[in-house]
Image (tube, rainbow, N blue to C red):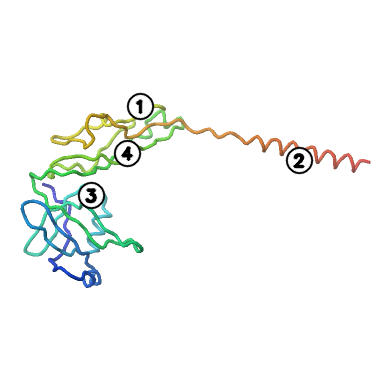
Amino acid sequence: MKISGNIPGKERKKGNTNPYLNDGLIPSIIYGGNTDPLMVAVDRIQLKKRFEEGGFYSKIFEVDLGEKKEPVIVKSIQRHKVKNHPIHVDFQRVDDKTRIIIGVPVEFVDQETSPGLKQGGVLNVVRREIELSCLASNIPEKFVISLEGKEIGDDIRLSSVTLGEGMKPTILGRDFMLATIQAPKVEKEPQATEEATDGADASEEKKEEKAAE
């Protein structure tokens, strides 16, 4: 099981969470497995660093509680309604045998070798991630899909992705769409513009005729 980094923290007690927030900690809970839920508070700065590294919800982290270390994935983050900073995190315990449902990002590459995009077509991304059921020991960081040779009108579906061993999409029985190469939009010149121009020319002609008289 690959650990992508650690998040320092400490165990906490029930009750008022403001003292933890004031100390730069985020009240959290670790649940899952055959162990009782554990109330903790994790370091806000380190959590932010892990988030900024990308793939935050598809990585396994280790909550470092000193003598105890808990391998986890992030299930959800509750944010302040006004300030938008994290105020609570739900972690799920994992081990090599844990099967989880997780969203894996999709990345589209080789856009420069797509004839459709070269002709002015537009990549319309329908899904930016694929939700999977997989073992915690086999979480893909992302799925990379090549657009080489893709023409205008082509679409990219689930069948374009090679899933690893034990991976199953949560949407079964359907080769759902991930993206399409759309034709470029052609904007027509407003007809009113030409009419306004003709009117302006006629007005200028009248002014010239009066001046000549």
From the top left corner, tell me how far across and down residue 121 is, in percent: 44, 32
Closer to the eye: label 1 or 3: 3
Distance from label 2 to label 4 (Cα)? 50 Å
Numbered circle sitting on residue 149: 1
Q: Nearer the viewer, mark 2 or mark 4?
A: 4
Please tell me how crowded label 3 is: few (under 14), some (14-19), or many (20+) other residues with Cα within 10 Å: some
Label 3: state its secondary structure: helix
Q: Label 3 amino acid? A: Tyr
Q: Amino acid at mark 2?
A: Ala
Q: Residue at x 17, y 55 (%)?
A: 91
The answer for how far apart the CA atoms under marks 4 and 3 are is: 16 Å
**Quarter occupied by residue 43:** bottom left
Q: Earlier in the sequence, mark 1 or mark 3?
A: 3
Q: CA distance from mark 1 to mark 3?
A: 32 Å
Instruction: Name the residue rendered at 38%, 34% in the picture.
Output: 112
* Residue under pointer 3: 57
Identify the secondary structure beneath mark 1.
Answer: loop
- Of mark 2 and mark 3, the one earlier in the sequence is 3
The reply, left or right, for residue 141 in relation to residue 209 is left
Disc 2/disc 1 C-alpha distance (Å): 50 Å
